[in-house]
Structures are given as structure tokens and as C-alpha cells.
Image (cartoon, rainbow, N blue to C red):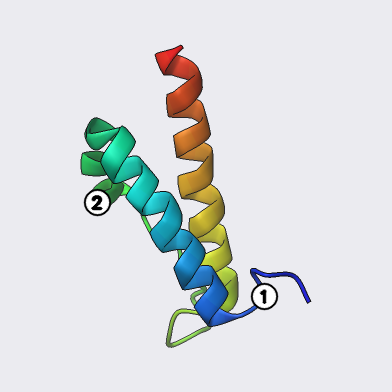
């Protein structure tokens, strides 16, 4: 099982990335409010798939932002 296959690991990783963004790039952290959490229209609650997609999105934002800063 990969480390991002359970809810606790996913939320921990989202927190880790978000904290890095907050401390290193506050201007990007401000924009996270505009980063949507896409939810499946068939689900009534947030799924692991939704969280994985959100994590991938904020990771890509961080990577792109870091590249642009160099």
C-alpha cells in the first residue's frame, strides 16, 4: 500500500505541502483559497480520490511557483 492510500496519510501530506507553501511562499498560500477541491458529482462526501487530486494540484502549484521564482 502506498503512503497516500489512506485518509490519514493524505491529510498529513496535504498539511505538509500547505505548511511549506505558507512558510516559504505566503503569496501563493493566499491563493490556495482559490484552489478548488473537485468532488465527484456522484459522491455525497469527499473521497480519497478527491483528496489525491487536490494534493496533486497543490503540489503542481508549488512546483510551478518554485520554478517561476528561480
Residue 28 at x, y = what percent?
29, 35
Q: Is residue 45 left or right of residue 40?
A: left
Q: Which residue is mark 1?
A: 5
**Tag 1 and tag 2, C-beta contact below 8 Å:** no
Q: Is the residue 62 above or below the residue 43 in the image?
A: above
The tag earlier along the polypeptide, 1 or 2, is: 1
Q: Which mark is residue 30?
A: none
* Residue positioned most to the top: 70
Between the C-alphas of marks 1 and 2, the distance is 25 Å
Q: Which residue is mark 2?
A: 33
Q: Is the residue 13 above or below the residue 39 in the image?
A: above
Q: Secondary structure at mark 1?
A: loop
Which mark is nearer the camera, 1 or 2?
1
Disc 1: CA contacts within 10 A as few (<14), some (14-19) or many (>=20): few
Q: How many marks?
A: 2
Disc 2: CA contacts within 10 A as few (<14), some (14-19) or many (>=20): few
Q: Is the residue 6 above or below the residue 31 in the image?
A: below
Q: Residue at x 53, y 80 (%)?
A: 7
Residue 48 at x, y = what percent?
57, 76
Which of the 4 image quadrants contains residue 45? bottom left
Residue 6 seen by the camera:
yes
Q: Secondary structure at mark 2?
A: helix
Q: Is the residue 39 above or below the residue 8 in the image?
A: above
Q: Residue at x 23, y 32 (%)?
A: 27
* Residue positioned most to the bottom: 44
Residue 24 at x, y = what percent?
32, 34
Q: Looking at the figure, which quarter contains the N terminus?
A: bottom right
Residue 39 seen by the camera:
no
Front-most of residues 43 and 12 = 12
Q: Residue at x 64, y 69 (%)?
A: 4
Front-most of residues 37 and 11 = 11
Q: Residue at x 44, y 51 (%)?
A: 17
Amino acid at each position: 500500500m502506498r503512503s497516500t492510500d489512506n485518509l490519514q496519510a493524505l491529510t498529513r501530506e496535504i498539511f505538509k505541502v500547505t505548511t511549506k507553501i505558507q512558510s516559504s511562499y505566503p503569496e501563493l498560500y493566499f491563493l490556495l483559497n482559490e484552489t478548488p477541491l473537485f468532488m465527484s458529482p456522484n459522491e455525497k462526501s469527499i473521497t480519497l480520490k478527491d483528496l489525491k487530486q487536490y494534493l496533486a494540484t497543490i503540489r503542481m502549484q508549488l512546483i510551478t511557483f518554485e520554478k517561476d521564482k528561480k
